[in-house]
Image: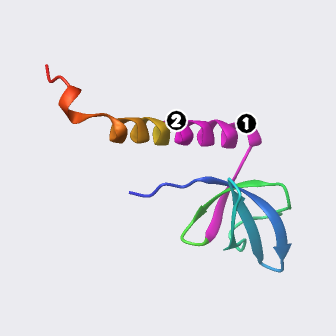
Amino acid sequence: MCLAIPSTIVAIDGDMGTIDVEGVRREASLLLLEDAAVGDWVIVHAGFAIQKLDEAAARESLQYLREAVAMTDAQARRDPATDVQE
């Protein structure tokens, strides 16, 4: 299974872009996108930006991912001795 996380293009150098995901930056190829620009929200897979997103959809996806991580963290911190199976 793949999980693509919305990223923002923060710099472009030729066919390569620097993308930012929640403060983490890395390089991604922009060869598969037409008219990529700084500020665009994109989905990156295997090092290639494969799709542009509108900002609202990107932020909504990031919020869902944050909530999933928070639920996973909370579940990992629970004391198994207090869990009740039905």
Residue 27 sits in quarter: bottom right
Expressed as whole percent of the image width and height from the top left, the position of residue 75 reads 35, 36
Residue at 61% over, 43% down: 62
Side (left or right) of 57 relative to 3: right
82 falls in the magenta region: no
SS class of the residue under badge 2? helix
* Residue type marked 2: Glu
Circle 1: element type: helix
Above or below, 37 against 63 in this view is below
Res 64 quadrant in image: top right
Tell me the chief SS of the magenta region. helix
Q: Which residue is mark 2?
A: 67
The correct choice, above or below, for 65 with respect to 85 in the image is: below
Q: CA distance from mark 2 to mark 1?
A: 17 Å
- Which residue position holds label 1? 56
Outermost residue toward the top in this view? 86
Q: For the residues labelled 2 and 1, say whether their Cβ atoms are less than 8 Å apart.
A: no
